[in-house]
Image (cartoon, rainbow, N blue to C red):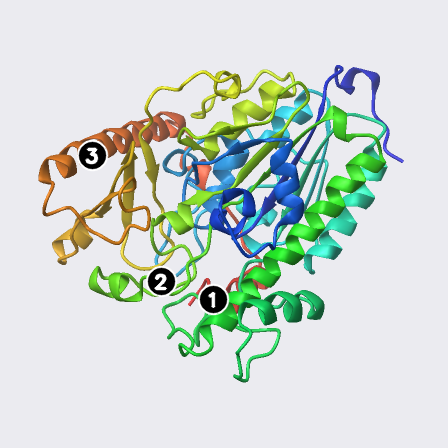
């Protein structure tokens, strides 16, 4: 039993449920234009929720991106995910406040269930949770654990955080969705791959991609993983209905980043990128993520305006009736009511693999900028017009130098402001925002996933 002192009980208000589906590309969902039919439960949720059609992650890989979702702070400020040579990246440390901390202070019971080494408490994302469980298993087992905890806390206000890992490599869907989905999407496949496959001979670290004949099957396995994760999200939503909690809960389903396949191998080689699944570029297939938000009193709608995942932090807290701590996110309540927002400067940073680069976007223009040392080595900026070229295949940097200059100035001002904010937060305290401690089993796990050399 859990004893809750009267002074710690939450005021009346909704529960908060956040589901992060790791590595889920937005364009796989039917509600985002996907045609494979693998997300019926998410698409059903989209019909009763606010769907953010243009939602940008803070970084194209897990640690800095989820840290930004849980704090409403950009990676350049919270520091989680900074690369340190060939070692593990930095963690979140002792600040800023997390979503779990803010909701726990308001009296909610806070429970997290996850499956990703970068979600481990060593990287700082456990702060504020009453219970934070690593369930290193398939998504159905993770959701079983989440539902068991949901039933246990259903008699009080709660925050439930669920992290699903299915669509992340290696792709190993259960047999039924494997044969049903991959078999349907690659019907003529006659190769030797079964229901488990890696994307490359050296996972995530620049290994050769599979032979062209195997690629449709490997991509089919990814879609089968998405189908399995979608089914588990449906089970969790059904549990909310069964426990009569759905009408009293703010529900968010979001991804931390997308996934890249082999649609731009020649382009990546020409611009000096390494080959990987994610974490190596700032292209839209990685930084545009799905976001579905259902809340009491909020009408379903599609938000076409560009927003960021850091905006989810103050929005969720406001919907829960909790005053948000200071953050860099924007409360999207006016947008949910139909008011147009101001134009945003969107920045993606903190690549995990390959040459260091950052990207800046204003409206439909997007610029990718190599770090100073990478530029000195010969890497050039890239400019794309997302309106006429949503696939980012035509580099317009040479043709539009005035746009390059303006976007670069916007991005550099934004990055400088974020670094200055970080320096103020760290003044007199040492670099506590980056503290983390890894046990040997964490290191071996990171190596097994290809994250460490």
Q: How crowded is mark 3: few (under 14 residues within 10 Å), some or many (20 or more)?
A: many
In this view, the residue farthest toward the right is 1
Q: Which of 34 and 345 is in front in this view?
A: 34
Q: Which label is found at residue 450? A: 1
**Number of the front mark, 1 or 3:** 3
Q: As displayed, is residue 236 above or below residue 202?
A: above
Mark before the other along the chain sequence, 2 or 1: 2
How far apart are the alpha carbons under marks 3 and 2?
A: 26 Å
Q: Which label is found at residue 263? A: 2
How far apart are the alpha carbons under marks 1 and 3?
A: 34 Å
Q: In this view, does 61 lie to the left or right of 246?
A: left
Q: Which label is found at residue 407? A: 3
**Number of the front mark, 2 or 1:** 2
Residue at image point 34% right, 49% down: 282
> Do the numbered discs 3 and 2 sit on residues whose CB atoms are within 8 Å?
no
The local secondary structure at tag 2 comes to loop
Q: In which image quadrant can residue 248 be found?
A: top right
Mark before the other along the chain sequence, 1 or 3: 3
């Amino acid at each position: 039993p859990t004893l809750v002192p009267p002074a710690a009980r939450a005021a009346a208000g909704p529960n908060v449920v956040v589901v992060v589906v790791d590595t889920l590309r937005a364009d796989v969902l039917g509600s985002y234009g996907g045609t494979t039919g693998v997300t019926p439960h998410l698409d059903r949720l989209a019909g009763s929720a606010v769907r953010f059609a243009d939602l940008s992650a803070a970084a194209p890989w897990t640690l800095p991106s989820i840290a930004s979702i849980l704090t409403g702070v950009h990676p350049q400020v919270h520091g989680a995910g900074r690369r340190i040579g060939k070692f593990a990246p930095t963690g979140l440390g002792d600040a800023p406040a997390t979503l779990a901390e803010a909701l726990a202070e308001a009296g909610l019971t806070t429970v997290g269930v996850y499956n990703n080494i970068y979600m481990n408490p060593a990287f700082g994302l456990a702060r504020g949770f009453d219970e934070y469980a690593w369930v290193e298993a398939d998504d159905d087992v993770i959701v079983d654990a989440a539902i068991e905890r949901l039933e246990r806390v259903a008699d009080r206000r709660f925050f439930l955080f669920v992290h699903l890992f299915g669509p992340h490599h290696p792709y190993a869907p259960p047999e039924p969705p494997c044969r049903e989905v991959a078999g349907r999407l690659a019907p003529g496949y006659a190769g030797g791959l079964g229901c488990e496959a890696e994307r490359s001979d050296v996972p995530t670290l620049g290994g050769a991609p599979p032979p062209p004949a195997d690629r449709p099957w490997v991509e089919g396995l990814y879609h089968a993983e998405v189908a399995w994760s979608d089914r588990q999200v449906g089970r969790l939503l059904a549990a909310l209905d069964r426990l009569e909690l759905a009408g009293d809960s703010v529900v968010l389903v979001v991804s931390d980043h997308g996934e890249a396949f082999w649609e731009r191998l020649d382009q990546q080689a020409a611009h000096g990128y390494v080959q990987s699944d994610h974490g190596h570029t700032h292209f839209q297939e990685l930084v545009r993520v799905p976001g579905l938000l259902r809340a009491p009193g909020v009408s379903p709608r599609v938000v076409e305006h560009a927003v960021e995942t850091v905006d989810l932090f103050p929005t969720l807290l406001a919907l829960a009736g909790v005053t948000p701590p200071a953050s860099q996110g924007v409360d999207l309540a006016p947008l949910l009511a139909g008011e147009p927002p101001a134009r945003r400067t969107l920045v993606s940073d903190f690549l995990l693999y390959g040459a260091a680069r950052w990207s800046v976007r204003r409206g439909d223009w997007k610029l990718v900028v190599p770090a100073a040392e990478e530029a000195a080595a010969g890497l050039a900026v890239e400019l794309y017009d997302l309106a006429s070229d949503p696939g980012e295949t035509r580099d317009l940097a040479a043709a539009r130098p005035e746009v390059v200059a303006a976007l670069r100035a916007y991005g550099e001002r934004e990055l400088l402001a974020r670094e200055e904010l970080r320096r103020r937060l760290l003044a007199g305290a040492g670099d506590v925002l980056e503290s983390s401690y890894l046990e040997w089993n964490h290191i071996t796990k990171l190596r097994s996933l290809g994250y460490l050399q």
